[in-house]
Image (spheres, grey):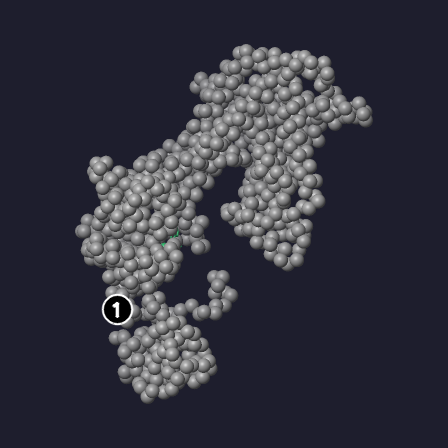
Amino acid sequence: MLEVERLRKTYTTDRGGVHAVEDVSFTVEDGRFYTLLGPSGCGKTTTLRCLAGLERPEGGVIRLDGRVLSGEGRFVPTYSRDIGMVFQSYAIWPHMSVFQNVAFPLEVSQDRPSKEEIARLVKEALALVGLEGLERRPAPQLSGGQQQRLALARALVRKPRLLLLDEPLSNLDAKLRQRMRIELRELQRRLGITTVYVTHDQAEALFLSHRVAVMQSGRIVQEGRPRELYASPASPFVADFVGDATFVPGEVVDGGVRALGGVVRCALSEALVPGAKALLVLRPERLLVHAGATGGPNEFAGTLRVAAFLGDHLDCVVEIGDTVMRARAHPAAELRRDQKVWVELPPDHCLAIPDDGWRPRALTRTFEQDTE
Amino acid sequence: MTSAGVTARRVALHAPTWRADVVIVAAAIAVLAYLTLFPLAILVLGAFSSGGSVFDFQFTTRWFARVLTDQASFELLANSLAYAGGSAVVAFAMGTAIAWAVERSDVPLRNLWYGIALVPLIVPGIIHTIAWLFLLSPEIGWINAPLKGAFGFSLSAYTIPGMIWIEGLHSAPLAFVLMSAAFRTMDPSLEEAAAASRADPWKTLRRVTLPLLLPTAASVVLILFVRTLESFEVPAIIGLPGRVFVYTSRIYLALKQYPPNYGLMAAYASVLLAISVLGLLLHRRVTRHAERFATITGKAYRPRRVELGRFRFLALAGLAVYGLLAVALPFVVLLYSSLIRVYTLPSVENFRELTLKNYSFILEDDLTRAAIVNSLKLALVSATVVVAITSVVAWITIRTRTPGRGLLDFLAFVPIAIPGIVLGVSLVWLYSTIQIGIYGTIWILIIAYVTRYLPYGIRSMSGGLAQIHKELEEASTAAGARWWPTFRRVTIPLLRPALLAAWIYVFIVSLRELSAGILLYSTQSVVLAIRIFDMRETGQYTAIAALSVMMIVVLVALVAVLQRLGGRTVQAT
Ligand SMILES: Nc1ncnc2c1ncn2[C@@H]1O[C@H](COP(=O)(O)OP(=O)(O)O)[C@@H](O)[C@H]1O
Ligand SMILES: [Mg+2]
């Protein structure tokens, strides 16, 4: 079990201190796949590097199986931690062959196995990632996907207690990324190795993880199982980051929110009492566009601005009053631009959360915003 | 990412529980400070002392007063600035023209010009200078004799223009190397955008290319200026007989006069040091600005070449003339002189009586033999020591956050501002005062060379290390390797090209070095360049020619072989 308590890390730069990680706590149960998810610069990598011992946090405690790795006046150096790590750049040593890369962690270990044992373990690790037969190949001659597998084999060959991965799929092309995602998931489930994974890709996080922690400016803002994060985000930031969302501000009434020129029936998060300011979170994939009124609950009339064919659905942009939202229509629906439509907001899939003032970046940014 | 620069410098690979890194850094600082700052401190102290050593220190401002107010001192300053400035401009103009032709035009035989332009970088300055003396000496120069016969006048080498020409020609390759790198790393889309705005090639060059290159150009001119200011070969071999004095030659005279005037020498050296430091500070300003331009990237592009059309062969002719003047003519005149008995202008009789006597003389001369052995020893030891020190220093400054690493980096860079002859003066002061028995031995030369070449080592190592992604080392730590296995099995192998390049560079320049050793050698520690310098004073020009030809052939072959072995181009600056 990995326990992280109140981790803090500040970088000193020429322009003062950067609070990269502030007060981060989480626990990863044995055999679980745990993901740190957040936008670039939110402190994911720094957290992971603290776990690896590549950074020295100035506060907090990190424990692996009850043993303190960092904090309480102790600091176990990286080379003494029982970890395997996959770097974003893969960090494959270009002056070594595939075999030498994977054998390295065994060769430098305190109780170095025999030559035959090393050969066997390397072979096993390469087979695990599907690279068998490439032992003699110089590492720079591997493709991107193969380097990624090699990095994984190297991280696994020591059979570490903890596997750390920093955006390992982000350098692959889309197709390969899909495939590696599946393989990585299967591998982790099969080996049952405790894993901490860092990514900014929410789909990847939802797909791979048992639990996900969403980070924002150096803090964990919400933590939970993937479906919990998707279904009940605690803040607009999380709602926006995990999945697509249209936000509609409104005032809480009994059983719903006053917005869109009426009352939207929806689930209310606990903190909300009638009269409070709230934000409706609408998932485009849950909203249905109809050419005519169906008479169901939560139906609002609007004007269709965009309808693009995407195979299994029409991706629509609808204007209701001065709110613009994305929604979906049946792929066979006959819809024309600027015609009147009805949008159905199924009450089960609508959620209102407290409005903390946070808004996603507008699509059309002003010049000042771009250069800041 | 905006913090990329910061991030790259502040990488943590600390061995945190064990503070030995602090001890290592402290030791390294002590060694470097001893090599670089201590001699300079003694030098400045010496310039304020009327006694002969630091131990009988008696404060005086006499030397500085003389150096700064003497009426000859104004002339000295004017000469130095004219010589250094003129050579810098000549070298820059030639180097830039060649760089542009080779990098940006479709002039034929482009690769050949790289090779040709690099040869003068390998040929020692003293050999180049003597070769041009054979060509431009007023009475018997190959160029002057016919001129005098035909038009009744000659172009004397023994003037400031003569010095500027000879030094400029020799430094042009440095400008070529630096400017061609600038041309190569400039984003061609900037020029293409000009073309797309309907600017013709000439306008593009004038309105876009040149303004973009301006900061780089300024920095190159400053480097050339400082290096020429420090140079000793042309000022001593041409300036002294021509009675054109500059700082380096004046310092030399102050020691060679009888009795030697150490205080005066130190004062002159301090002034030269100050000017050199000033030039480099200016250079820093200019290049810091250049970074803000941010048009010159580290990437190598493949720009479209300007089609010269009918000027193509004119450009080729221009390059050929350069090759002739900088490489072919000097070599031919040396080869010819090395094969005759007594130096005279070429004639039919001379060609009938060609002889190898000069070569056998050189190879049997005890002093020359000693010089060859000493030079090789010095080059081997200096290159190895410099590489060993700088690889560790570079690693500490780039990869750790140990306190004091900034100072370490600075100390290793200080010698870049110390002219060779000033370093010589400082060491004369230091080791004639503190007698630890190395004065007059090869050891003092080793100290001088190592100190002088530290900055080149640091630059090569830091550059090489910065290119090695830090994750490659972190992956090793994460795999369970401690500092030493990581350094040995990951860092050093990846750093090998940079290590080798630095080693080769220091080795070659050590073999050519004159100015740092000229005040420090004794008969038992004579080296090649100094041997040539001495033989010149006794007028053994044909023997010098033979030794020069051998040196050129060996050095060029050596560089070719070493480059094959895996080094990059021997870098200049
Ligand atoms: N070595 C460093 N020096 C200074 N600031 C850093 C360094 N590494 C990261 N930071 C800063 O810390 C913050 C968090 O960085 P990081 O953990 O790399 O983010 P993420 O991996 O989530 O993109 C960023 O603002 C980043 O600029
Ligand atoms: Mg990151």
Q: Which quarter of the picture shows residue A180?
A: bottom left
Q: Is residue B378 left or right of residue B18?
A: right
Front one among A361 and B267: A361
Q: In this orientation, does residue A233 appear?
A: yes
Q: Residue at x 60, y 53 (%)?
A: B191
Q: Which residue is mark 1?
A: A228
Q: Secondary structure at mark 1?
A: helix
Outermost residue on the right side: it is B151
Q: Residues within 10 Å of mark 1 (few under 14, many from 20)?
A: some
- Viewport quadrant of the N terminus of chain B: bottom left
Q: Is residue A120 left or right of residue B230?
A: left
Coordinates of residue B307 in the picture (x, y in percent): 65, 47
Which residue is pictured at 62% across the width and 31% down the height? B170
Q: Identify the residue shown where x is 37% and y is 47%.
A: A142
**Residue closer to the observer: B547 or B269:** B547
For this orientation, the residue located farthest to the front is A133
- Residue B328 sits in quarter: top right
Front residue of B561 and B532: B561
Residue at horizontal 48 percent and vertical 21 percent from the top? B376
